[in-house]
């Protein structure tokens, strides 16, 4: 999973530099404090932390979907404030937690998946065509193209959401707990799909989760968040086997069987 | 993985998610009344036995057929000898024109303000809420009478004046929905896909507001029709000799003691249409509430 020895230092795909964010309100609530994080090109970086630690807030800021009070976000070295919405869309796409609210119930699946193409002015017919193709690629038959989200299960919806994220060939995927709203039996399928697409398309993936098991499956490196701050960053091996922070230890110990069953079901382990 | 999610082997969508709307009889009764009125208005020239304007002093104040009149004038004639049934049929055009015209204008006004307030928040929202407070503090009837007196009366003006008072519910509903939808994940996804805010509002958000807004529209339409009748009754609305149900009542008020049916017939028509539209709106509300959830 590592870069081959002797390769040049990987570029940074997405970088937050000293980002702070407060939600407006009566007592302005500081959701992020001085967060710096770097997603290297081609890697999967997991962000873990308990509920309310600011993971979703960070992901929306990295995507340029909410303003930041302080700091900078760089996408391949360029300040995202200087990029247009379309330019950002071409480079990075989100996969959200809840596939029941991330797909517009009024649109057909083909329209939903084609959105990034339609948004940049591609002809409707060809965009819908490509969307249908991608629906097949993520394991939904072309018959689903004309259906609406209400006809789909959670797992199927999340496949469509992933197809939408992939259709415009972005370099970066920001996934905010992409499986936590799904049945356990479906979670592994979605993670496998993400992993497969990540390899084929050489994506850089920021994967938010509060599931340490998912980290062990998917990630190269991991950052641990607590109360709006990053408390620990490192390779998955280092952080999971020798956590430096008490808090990280606590997170890991909350997963009963990390070193047992999980590793054996890692289909991508066979690859180099 | 954690055991936080229940283990369910089946990943198929449950059938119960595609449910049939359930509505009481109100929806159907109200819908039928509205449809019937629309048909009356459209086919008025075919359905009306006489011209609604033709006066005949020789045939003044003929009683309706159920009070001993003749089939030539099934609902009798008024003080100018005009056929009441024909005026009633043509009058439906006025009521519907005012109803639809008014809500069209007030919907644009209210929804536009509501979306702006809900999406932009902050000062825009504060300003719109201020406008709403001002509007709600104006007594509709008095203000409408004053405006009407000031500006004169015509059908177009009447619709404008009524629309000016009936946008508040559109505003309240669309503002609340906009606040909820602007942070919906599918809206965030549309922004991440690169769509402009205008596109997102029109193509992603508005289609998810139609249900509640249609309900508001029906109820406000009933409101507008009632106000039109009242203003016409006061001589401030539709001008004679045009046929309007409110105007028919106004013209008959001198005869109300001896020829009460002259007032009762258009009164009944107003009541039926307003009640029908209200039933329809309430019925729609039930349907949308039952079909709510995800
Ligand atoms: N729109 C908002 N307005 C005010 N406070 C908010 C808003 N969204 C989130 N917060 C607060 O910011 C903090 C961080 O929220 P965030 O959603 O980023 O956490 P999270 O790590 O994603 O949690 P979870 O694991 O539950 O998804 C929380 O305390 C939350 O209450
Ligand atoms: Mg979250």
Image: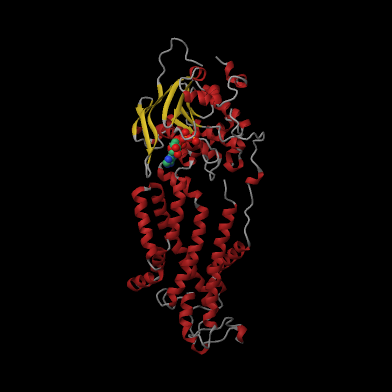
**Camera-side residue: A179 or B71?**
A179
Does the rendering let one see residue B206?
yes
Quarter of the image with the N terminus of chain B in it = top right
Q: Residue at x 48, y 38 (%)?
A: A115
Q: Is residue A157 above or below residue A193?
A: below
Determine the residue located farthest toward the top in the rendered image.
A6
Q: Residue at x 67, y 35 (%)?
A: B10
> Is B138 left or right of A168, judged from the image as shown?
left
Specify the quadrant of the image occupied by residue A144.
top right
Q: Residue at x 46, y 22 (%)?
A: A245
Does the rendering let one see residue A121?
no
The percent position of residue A171, horizontal first and vertical second, equals 45, 26
**Camera-side residue: B292 or B234?**
B292
Specify the quadrant of the image occupied by residue A154.
top right
Specify the quadrant of the image occupied by residue A11.
top left
**Camera-side residue: B294 or B258?**
B294
Q: Is residue A123 above or below residue A257?
A: below
Determine the residue located farthest toward the bottom in the rendered image.
B58
Q: How is the image coloured?
A: secondary structure
The percent position of residue A254, horizontal first and vertical second, equals 55, 27
The percent position of residue A51, horizontal first and vertical second, equals 49, 34
Ligand 1's quadrant is: top left
**Camera-side residue: B52 or A192?**
A192
The percent position of residue A71, horizontal first and vertical second, equals 34, 30
Quarter of the image with the C terminus of chain B in it = top right
């Amino acid at each position: 999973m590592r870069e081959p020895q002797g390769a040049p230092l990987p570029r940074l795909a997405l970088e937050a530099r000293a980002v702070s964010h407060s939600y407006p309100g009566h007592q302005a609530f500081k959701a992020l404090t001085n967060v710096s994080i770097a997603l290297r090109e081609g890697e999967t970086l997991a962000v873990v932390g308990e509920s309310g630690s600011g993971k979703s807030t960070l992901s929306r800021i990295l995507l340029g979907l909410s303003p930041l009070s302080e700091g900078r976000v760089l996408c391949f070295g360029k300040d995202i404030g200087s990029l247009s919405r379309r330019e950002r869309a071409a480079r990075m796409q989100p996969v959200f937690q809840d596939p029941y609210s991330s797909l517009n119930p009024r649109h057909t699946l083909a329209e939903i998946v084609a959105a990034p193409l339609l948004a940049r002015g591609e002809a409707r017919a060809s965009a819908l065509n490509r969307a249908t193709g991608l629906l097949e690629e993520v394991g939904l038959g072309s018959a689903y193209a004309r259906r609406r989200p209400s006809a789909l299960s959670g797992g199927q919806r999340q496949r469509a959401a992933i197809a939408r994220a992939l259709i415009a060939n972005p370099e970066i995927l920001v996934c905010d707990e992409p499986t936590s709203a799904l049945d356990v039996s479906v979670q592994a399928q979605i993670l496998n799909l993400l992993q497969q697409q990540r390899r084929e398309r050489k994506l850089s993936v920021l994967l938010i989760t509060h599931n340490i098991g998912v980290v062990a499956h998917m990630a190269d490196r991991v950052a641990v968040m607590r109360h709006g701050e990053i408390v620990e960053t490192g390779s998955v091996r280092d952080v999971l086997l020798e956590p430096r922070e008490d808090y990280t230890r606590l997170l890991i110990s909350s997963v009963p069987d990390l070193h047992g069953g999980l590793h054996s079901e890692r289909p991508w382990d066979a690859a180099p | 993985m954690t055991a936080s999610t229940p283990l369910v082997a089946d990943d198929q969508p449950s059938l119960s998610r595609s449910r049939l709307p359930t509505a009481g009889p109100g929806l159907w009764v109200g819908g039928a009344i509205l449809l019937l009125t629309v048909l009356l208005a459209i086919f008025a020239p075919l359905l009306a036995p006489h011209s609604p304007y033709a006066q005949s002093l020789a045939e003044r104040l003929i009683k309706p057929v159920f009070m001993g009149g003749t089939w030539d004038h099934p609902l009798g004639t008024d003080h100018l000898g005009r056929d009441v049934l024909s005026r009633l049929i043509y009058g439906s055009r006025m009521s519907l024109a005012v109803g639809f015209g008014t809500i069209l204008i007030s919907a644009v006004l209210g929804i536009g303000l509501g979306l702006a307030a809900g999406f932009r928040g902050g000062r825009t929202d504060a300003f719109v809420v201020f406008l709403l407070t001002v509007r709600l503090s104006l007594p509709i009837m008095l203000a409408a009478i004053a405006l009407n007196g000031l500006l004169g009366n015509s059908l177009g003006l009447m619709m404008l004046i009524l629309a000016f008072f009936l946008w508040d519910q559109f505003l309240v509903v669309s503002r609340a929905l906009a606040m909820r939808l602007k942070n919906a994940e599918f809206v965030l996804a549309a922004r991440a896909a690169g769509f402009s805010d205008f596109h997102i509002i029109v193509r992603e958000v508005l289609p998810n507001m139609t249900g509640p807004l249609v309900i508001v529209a029906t109820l406000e339409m009933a409101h507008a029709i009632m106000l039109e009748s009242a203003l016409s009754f006061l001589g401030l609305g539709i001008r004679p000799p045009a046929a309007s149900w409110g105007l028919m009542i106004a013209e008959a008020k001198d005869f109300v003691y001896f020829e009460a049916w002259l007032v009762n017939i258009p009164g009944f028509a107003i009541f039926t249409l307003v009640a029908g539209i209200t039933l329809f709106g309430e019925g729609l509300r039930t349907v949308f509430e039952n079909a709510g959830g995800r």
